[in-house]
Every structure is written in C-alpha cells, then in structure tokens.
Image (tube, rainbow, N blue to C red):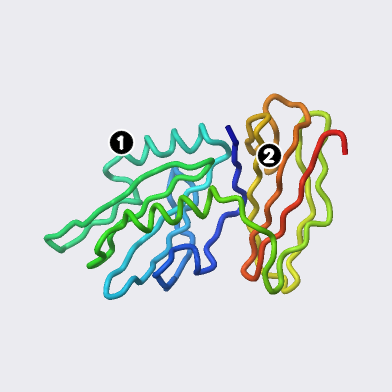
C-alpha cells in the first residue's frame, strides 16, 4: 500500500469543486501547532476547512484523537445558530482535516471527499507554468532531499509517495523508515501546474 507524506500543504482555490476560496491563513492551534484555516463559499453557504500538518501518519492520528477528545480545542468554533450543521474529521497521510458547515452549507461531506481525493491523487504533470524539480537525492540513511523552484516564485507544496517504506519528516527533512533507499515519487504542486519526478535507489 502506498505511503504518503505532505510537506507545506496550502490551498490555491481549485481543491474543492463548486466552491470559491474566500480566504486562507494560519492560526495558532496551541499544542496542536499551526493550523491552516480556510473559508470556502459554495452557493449561498460557507464551508470552513482546517488543516494540521504533522511529521508522520502516526502524528496525524494522534492529533486527530486529540481534536476529538478536547472539546475546548481552538478548532471547535462556537455558533449562535440553532443549526450546528455537519462536521467531518479525518486524517490522511500526515494531515488532519476538519471540514465544517460555517453557514447554510448543504453538506460538508462532498467537500471532505473532494479534498481527500485531491490529497491522495496521483496527478499528471503539466499546467501553464508548473514548478521545476531540478534535483532529488536519497542518502544511505533514507533522507530525501530535493530542489524545487516555481517560475513565478510562488509557493509550492510537495507530496511524496512510496510503496516500499514508511515516510515521515525529521528535522524538516523527509525520511524513509526503515532507513534505506527506496523508490519515491516526488510531486510538486504549484498554483499554475504540477511537476513529477521519480527517485530510485539505483539511479
């Protein structure tokens, strides 16, 4: 089964079909760390999506359990309306995502499914001005290093995928567990396109 690691996740506005990104910013999630909070307009309703980025899938599972346990979590927002709406909580790779009705949204489940599909998809490279992956290296200890640039110097987030090991982040770098080289797909996602590179231990 594929293992995923997401680095520097962000929204560009096309991740939720049928919805328009109104704003996205980082807030302080206290012991949970930085939280990427975004608001999406779908018709007359609003959908809020919060994303936490951990160092591994295990970290994400623990953070999800913390969110579900702690009713005083900064991710839980009080509402004055009688209709509390829907909320979907899930973990995918090293991300925790909370998708909730922020005002007259018909359903949050479609948005949650779309976001989950976007994170797990194996995208085709291309676009008007995709990022450029100039280097991908793997050390004997399983550390993965790469150089990625965007033609317009805009932000890029990275998705790493392998089916031969577990991926995690250590001291800001992606590493394979166990610490041995394995085939890894590096996907760079930019506002104007996607780039894909393959790294293999025998390359």
Residue 48 is drawn in which quadrant?
A: bottom left
Name the image quarter holding the N terminus.
Answer: top right
**Residue at image coords 28%, 45%:** 72
Q: How far across and how far down the image is residue 181, in percent?
A: 78, 31
Total marks in image: 2
**Residue at image coords 35%, 51%:** 75
The crowding category of the residue bearing disc 2, from other C-alpha atoms within 10 Å (few below 14, some 14 to 19, many at least 20), is few
Q: Are marks 2 and 1 in contact (CB under 8 Å)?
A: no
Q: How far across and how far down the image is residue 175, in percent?
A: 70, 35
Alpha carbon of mark 2 to alpha carbon of mark 1: how far? 28 Å
Q: Is residue 184 above or below residue 44?
A: above
Depth order, front residue of 170/11: 11
Q: Is residue 65 above or below residue 97?
A: above
- Side of 201 relative to 42 (left or right): right
Name the image quarter holding the C terminus.
Answer: top right
Name the element at disc 2.
loop
User: Looking at this rendering, what residue extends furthest in the front direction?
Assistant: 124
Depth order, front residue of 191/162: 162
Disc 2 target residue: 171
Q: How far across and how far down the image is residue 25, in percent?
A: 48, 64
Q: How far across and how far down the image is residue 85, in percent?
A: 21, 57
Disc 1 target residue: 69
Name the element at disc 1.
helix
**Residue at image coords 65%, 61%:** 156
User: Looking at this rendering, what residue extends furthest in the right direction?
Assistant: 203
User: Looking at this rendering, what residue extends furthest in the top direction?
Assistant: 178
Q: Does label 2 or label 1 sit earlier along the sequence?
A: 1
- Side of 35 relative to 107 (left or right): right
Depth order, front residue of 89/32: 89
Residue 115 badge: none
The crowding category of the residue bearing disc 1, from other C-alpha atoms within 10 Å (few below 14, some 14 to 19, many at least 20), is few
**Residue at image coords 28%, 56%:** 77
């Amino acid at each position: 089964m594929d293992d995923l690691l997401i680095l520097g996740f962000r929204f560009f506005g096309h991740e939720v079909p049928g919805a328009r990104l109104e704003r996205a910013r980082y807030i302080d999630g206290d012991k949970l760390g930085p939280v990427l909070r975004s608001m999406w307009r779908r018709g007359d309703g609003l959908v809020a999506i919060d994303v936490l980025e951990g160092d591994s899938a295990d970290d994400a599972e623990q953070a999800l359990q913390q969110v579900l346990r702690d009713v005083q979590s900064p991710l839980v927002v009080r509402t004055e309306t009688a209709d509390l709406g829907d909320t979907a909580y899930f973990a995918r790779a090293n991300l925790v995502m909370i998708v909730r009705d922020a005002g007259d949204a018909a359903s949050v489940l479609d948005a949650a499914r779309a976001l989950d599909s976007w994170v797990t998809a194996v995208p085709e490279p291309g676009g008007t001005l995709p990022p450029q992956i100039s280097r991908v290296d793997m050390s004997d200890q399983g550390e993965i290093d790469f150089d990625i640039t965007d033609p317009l110097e805009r932000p890029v987030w990275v998705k790493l995928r392998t089916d031969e090991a577990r991926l995690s982040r250590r001291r800001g770098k992606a590493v394979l567990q166990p610490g041995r080289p394995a085939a890894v797909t590096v996907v760079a996602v930019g506002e104007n396109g996607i780039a894909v590179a393959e790294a293999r231990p025998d390359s």
